[in-house]
Amino acid sequence: MANINVTAEQMDKLMGIVSSKLGIPKENLKKDLEQGKFDSALKNMKPADVATFNQMVNNPKMLEKFMSTPQAQALYSKLTGGK
């Protein structure tokens, strides 16, 4: 994956947007994602969005395409501490 630099401010803003869309407090969402837990996020998503998410994670080619986007790479890098 490419090394994409995202500032703490940008990541905080992104987490805020996602948490508000899902109806989850930002800190709870961040903690869950860092621990690899998606249950709390999924239970607050629209059924169609959950279906799309499940379809993507169960399709290696679709997941690879998604993970190759700069936004996904930046989020992954930030959540994993660049590991």
Image (cartoon, helix red, strand yellow):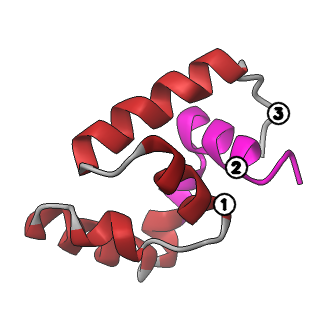
Residue where numbered disc 2 is placed:
79
Instruction: Report the magenta residues as a range.
Output: 64-83
- Inspect the image, locate mark 1, and give the three-letter code of the amino acid beneath it: Glu
Sooner in the amino-acid sequence: mark 1 or mark 2: 1
Measured along the vertical axis of the image, is residue 4 above or below residue 79?
A: above
- Kindly indicate whether the residue at mark 2 contacts the one at mark 1 (C-beta within 8 angstroms): yes
Residue where numbered disc 1 is placed:
34
Sooner in the amino-acid sequence: mark 2 or mark 3: 3
- Inspect the image, locate mark 3, and give the three-letter code of the amino acid beneath it: Asn
- Magenta residue check for 9: no
Give residue 3's mark: 3
- Magenta residue check for 76: yes
In what element is the residue under mark 2?
Answer: helix
Residue, far left: 47
Number of the front mark, 2 or 3: 2
Sooner in the amino-acid sequence: mark 1 or mark 3: 3
The answer to which of 48 and 46 lies nearer the viewer is 46
